[in-house]
């Protein structure tokens, strides 16, 4: 990945990167590709595609959320670090918490954060259903993000319990985001969310559709949510 590529892409979002941030993205890509040889982190391995489909895609919520005014961000089911790590690179003052259910991905992310010199990052190997019940984390984050983890009805139960009242849940979805949202309106309301706002955009090179769904948290989530691990996926709220 050339620095010019990511710089140009990020510029389309109205962001400007320092030379240090550009180098962090370069290092991130190198570490990702190296570790991907020994563990399945991504099927996207072309430099230009990583820049667009991972880095740029992770930063698209910045069009609709002012991350420079946010203190705490929790990324649920982060996988190889998307969208949490790219957002942290661009907004270094963020206090970033990452939750993922696979220890090997947490090991990778710990290495990435060390290599990039990221500060104020906390990594947790846990199920979202369990993490959302824990004191100190439940309803404590300004923004909770998740990308390509589950359908909106399930994802809302994973994420909304972690959002503080007055905060926001941001789901990064593909072309079917609107359809998924229609199926999850009742679940969002049950979990304390307000009416969702949907933003559609196209990736600048591939031109495929992306949907950013933002849900404001207006009420405290009932204590019974999230339900036990595995239940939300097997029996989504309706």
Image (cartoon, helix red, strand yellow):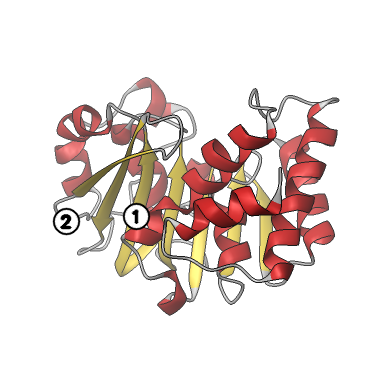
What residue appears at the point 81 percent right and 43 percent down from the top-left corner?
31
**Spatial CA span between label 2 and label 1:** 10 Å
Indicate left or right for 117 with 162 as reference: right
Q: Count numbered badges in the picture.
A: 2
Please rate how many residues cluster around mark 1, counting C-alpha atoms within 10 Å: few if below 14, some from 14 to 19, many from 20: many
- Camera sees residue 226: no
Indicate left or right for 81 with 218 as reference: right
What residue appears at the point 15 percent right and 39 percent down from the top-left corner?
185
Q: Nearer the viewer, residue 131 or 173?
A: 173
State the image coordinates of residue 208 (x, y, percent, origin top left): 37, 29
Q: Which circle's residue, 2 or 1, is located before the other in the chain?
A: 1
Please rate how many residues cluster around mark 2, counting C-alpha atoms within 10 Å: few if below 14, some from 14 to 19, many from 20: some
What residue appears at the point 46 percent right and 40 percent down from the top-left corner?
147
Q: Nearer the viewer, residue 123 or 37?
A: 37
Indicate left or right for 2 with 151 as reference: right
State the image coordinates of residue 158 (x, y, percent, origin top left): 41, 43
State the image coordinates of residue 41 (x, y, percent, origin top left): 70, 30
Q: Nearer the viewer, residue 146 or 201?
A: 201
The residue where tag 1 is placed is 169
In which quadrant is the N terminus drawn? Answer: top right
- The label shown at residue 194 is 2
In which quadrant is the C terminus drawn? Answer: top left
């Amino acid at each position: 990945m050339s620095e010019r590529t990511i710089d140009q892409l990020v510029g389309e979002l109205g962001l400007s990167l320092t030379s240090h941030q550009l180098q962090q993205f370069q290092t991130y890509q190198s570490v990702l590709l190296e570790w991907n040889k020994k563990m399945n982190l991504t099927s996207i391995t072309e430099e230009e595609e990583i820049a667009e489909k991972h880095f740029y895609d992770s930063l698209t919520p910045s069009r609709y959320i002012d991350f420079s005014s946010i203190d705490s961000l929790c990324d649920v089911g982060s996988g190889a670090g998307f969208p949490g790590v790219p957002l942290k690179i661009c907004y270094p003052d963020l206090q970033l918490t990452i939750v993922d259910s696979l220890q090997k991905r947490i090991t990778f992310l710990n290495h990435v954060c060390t290599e990039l010199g990221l500060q104020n990052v906390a990594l947790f190997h846990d199920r979202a259903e369990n993490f959302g019940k824990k004191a100190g984390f439940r309803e404590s984050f300004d923004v909770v993000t998740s990308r390509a983890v589950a359908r909106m009805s399930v994802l809302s139960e994973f994420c909304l319990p972690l959002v503080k009242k007055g905060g926001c849940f941001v789901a990064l979805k593909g072309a079917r985001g609107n359809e998924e949202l229609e199926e999850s309106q009742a679940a969002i309301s049950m979990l304390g969310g307000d009416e969702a706002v949907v933003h559609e955009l196209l990736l600048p090179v591939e031109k495929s559709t992306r949907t950013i769904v933002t849900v404001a948290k207006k009420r405290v989530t009932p204590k019974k949510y999230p339900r036990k691990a595995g239940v939300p996926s097997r029996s989504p709220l309706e």
